[in-house]
Image (cartoon, rainbow, N blue to C red):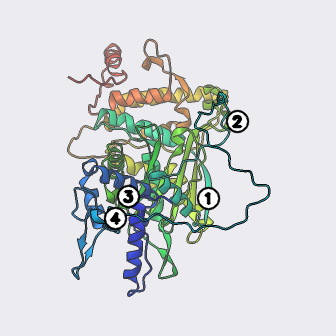
Amino acid sequence: MHRSNFVEEAIQAVAESSRGATSSGHPAEDPLAEFGANEWLVEEMYERYRKDPDSVDKVWWDFFKDSGRTVKGTDSGAQGSTSTSNGTSNGSSQAPAPTQEKAKAPVKPAVSAPTHATPRADARPPQPTSTAPVPKEPEAAPKAEAVDEPTLSVLRGAPARTAQNMDASLTVPTATSVRSVPVKLLIDNRIVINNHLSRARGGKVSFTHVIGYALVKALKSMPEMNRGFDVVDGKPTLITPAHINLGLAIDMAKPDGTRQLLVPSIKGAELMDFAGFWTAYEEIVRKARTNKLAVSDFQGTTISLTNPGTIGTNHSVPRLMKGQGTIVGVGSMDYPPEYQGASEETLTRNAVSKVMTLTSTYDHRVIQGAQSGEFLKRIHALLLGEDGFYDEIFRALRIPYEPIRWARDISANHDDEISKQARILELIHAYRVRGHIMADTDPLEYQQRSHPDLEVETHGLTLWDLDREFATGSFGGEGRRFMKLRNILGILRDSYCRTVGIEYMHIQDPEQRRWIQQRVEQPHIKPPRG
């Protein structure tokens, strides 16, 4: 049975650690166990290291040398014999080749003893031997037959390690909690964040950035979800890590068309604000895509986050690897099935939000179902803005105004719709008069600015009105008589609340005010790079 050199050496390392552990009483451990789901990658990197050491980062050289693994051209112990402490030679296990004299020694022919068996009565007499060639019969043309048998391929290298990991994961008794979360507020606040970033520091915040940060915040309030299980000295042991090391499942496409899953981790995530978490997240992804991940990036993962929703999967129950207590799966964001055929007008009129399914797969030996359910409930609450979750994100990114708040839709009849239209015009007027109060005009000090007259809640509006259209009056100008509230607020903030404050409503001449409005109240257009 064929096994790769790496597996052979891993087995040898286990045997040596077992012999060395007899005096201490500690059981031997798998030298790759600390890598969890990334064990296959270590083997693949070692194969590349053996073929060409320069094809891997120098950090891997030190790791393989410290692990006792050697390679031709990089370590003197890779070939030939090595001397042990007692002076004996520890060389190859093959026997020495025979000398030339031994190879030319004559070999005596085997002599068979004569037999005296009585010939059988029905034996045929010996036939004369003919030297004439025997004519050959014409060979029949080969028949084309369909191959019905399956093709068998022995798994080696990374696929073999993945199969071993999946077998090992079966030893972890797991259960899964599921929760659906409305993502209307997450979508709206992400739009506000990215609109500000496009005008300021640049960059882009993804849904997974915010969800991952909510996961870390929930873990800080429920540290029991960050625990693991192992057997130490033959006894079941609860493992409580010192930090939250969040593993990120990154699906990578290889040049041959196959795919591989990397799970590096963000170390000490609980110590970061959102800006630091966002930066660390992007750095891990960058290193994965440029093949710059080091050994330390895969070690010490305590909890993992996987997001198959990016490829359309709406519900995921991932496998849990040994040593980790929880893995969270994030499903796709879409409208409930019963509304997926509805028009956009119906969806906005009935206040229908897209939903996202979260799953928590946990080790049932150390985590109970009630804890897992409470954990998802905590993430749910954070994504709806509880405990100042979005305020904290806005402060970390230095966004100078308050986030959108979660609220129930205010149902309205025909008369209320007319009243709501009037409140939209009041909101536009409030920005023209007091918008400069929210302008970010101090480059030396960050301050989150707000004014009650500029908050949509003051005017009886909610986030559910953002995608509804309203008449704009004089604000719309030509071609913009009706606009979504989202677009109205965007233009108002671009006009009055960015880095320049404009105060002009004290001007008595309406023509002069209108002249300013027509030139100021325009959508933001990013200037081209010079």
Residue 105: image tag: 4
Q: Nearer the viewer, residue 422 or 105?
A: 105
Q: In x, y percent, where is residue 430? A: 41, 31
Residue occupying the point 48% across, 59% down:
218
Q: Nearer the viewer, residue 298 or 79?
A: 79
Residue occupying the point 43% across, 30% down:
489
Q: Closer to the observer: label 2 or label 4? A: 4
Residue sitting at the far bottom: 23
Q: Which residue is mark 3?
A: 298
Q: Nearer the viewer, residue 378 or 412?
A: 378
Q: Closer to the observer: label 2 or label 1? A: 1
Q: Secondary structure at mark 1?
A: strand
Mark 4 or 1 closer to N-term?
4
Q: Secondary structure at mark 2?
A: helix
Give the amino acid at mark 4. Ala
Q: In x, y percent, where is residue 100? A: 28, 62
Q: Which residue is mark 1?
A: 176
Left or right, 464 with respect to 213, comes to: right
Instruction: Find out whether the residues at labels 2 and 3 contact each other: C-beta distance under 8 Å.
Output: no
